[in-house]
Image (cartoon, helix red, strand yellow):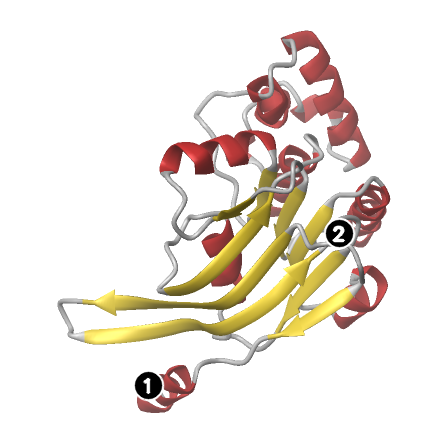
Amino acid sequence: MNESPILRVEAYSKHFDLHEQGKIIPSSSNVNLNVYRGRLTALIGQTGAGKSTVLKGIYRTYLPSSGRLLYRMENGHEIDLSNADEHRILELRRTEISFVTQFLHVLPRQSTEDVVAQPLLKKGMNKIQARNIARDMLAALNLPETLWGISPATFSGGEKQRVNLARGLVSRPRLLLLDEPTASLDPKTTKRVIKLIENLKNEGVAMLSIFHQPDLVERLADDVVELEPPLAFEKILEEII
């Protein structure tokens, strides 16, 4: 492939220090991958391989223990996300990088349509237009209109996941991170999510996603990266068992 990747992950590793116990818990180890415009790279691997840790490192929820996370801006300039300052990271989250996690975190009493419209408002879109686009996305994800005007705090797991997906997809970022995007969804909504992901790929969005369902990997992934648990993690499991 001649096109330069939007994201290059080079020798990324992450461990957690349990200072009180004097232990180090390994998570991701020596991860290397590329993510390209209009393509989806799937992360697969057994529990403990550090798949979610990779996504959180790219989004800078975690600081890496070692390695580089090179993000290429539209002007061709590369930023190492592993050591970029907080202001730059917040700006990239606002304008270019979106992360759909497995859990929905929202402000109390904020309506669902405003939760979904938030990324558009942060980009400077007016409230009426942002809400209209948010409503279209909620409809595309099969969330009943009766729920749009109330807080998602009391929604079911599947309903919250639809809100989470709507918020992550609505702004059409340059780089989209997806952590098990179809978890907790019924088959009908899963089909809609698959269609939305395919549409975003056609629009040129670069994606890095965790999947546990082989059929989704087969259908959606252009590239597949399998992670192995660090050897030290396997030893820890043996001690626990």
Q: Residues within 10 Å of mark 1 (few under 14, many from 20)?
A: few
User: Against 110, is 154 above or below?
Assistant: below
Mark earlier in primary sequence (1, 2): 2
Q: Is residue 216 left or right of residue 25?
A: right
Q: Quadrant of residue 136?
A: top right
Q: Secondary structure at mark 1?
A: helix
- The residue that appears at 81% across and 47% down in the rendered structure is 201
Q: Is residue 52 left or right of residue 147?
A: left
Q: Quadrant of residue 152?
A: top right
Q: Is residue 17 left or right of residue 235?
A: left
Q: Quadrant of residue 23?
A: bottom left
Position of the N terminus by quadrant: bottom right
Residue 185 x %, y %: 71, 51
Q: Which residue is mark 1?
A: 240
What is the three-letter code of the residue carrying label 2? Answer: Asp
The answer, for residue 156, to whether it is visible in the render is no
In front: 81, or 110? 81
In front: 113, or 67? 67
Residue 232 x %, y %: 37, 85
Q: Residues within 10 Å of mark 2 (few under 14, many from 20)?
A: few
Position of the C terminus by quadrant: bottom left
Mark sitting on residue 186: 2
What is the three-letter code of the residue carrying label 1? Answer: Ile
User: Against 149, is 229 above or below?
Assistant: below
For the residues carrying marks 1 and 2, which lies nearer the camera in this image? 1
- The residue that appears at 76% across and 72% down in the rendered structure is 214
State the separation of the CA atoms marked 1 and 2.
Answer: 35 Å
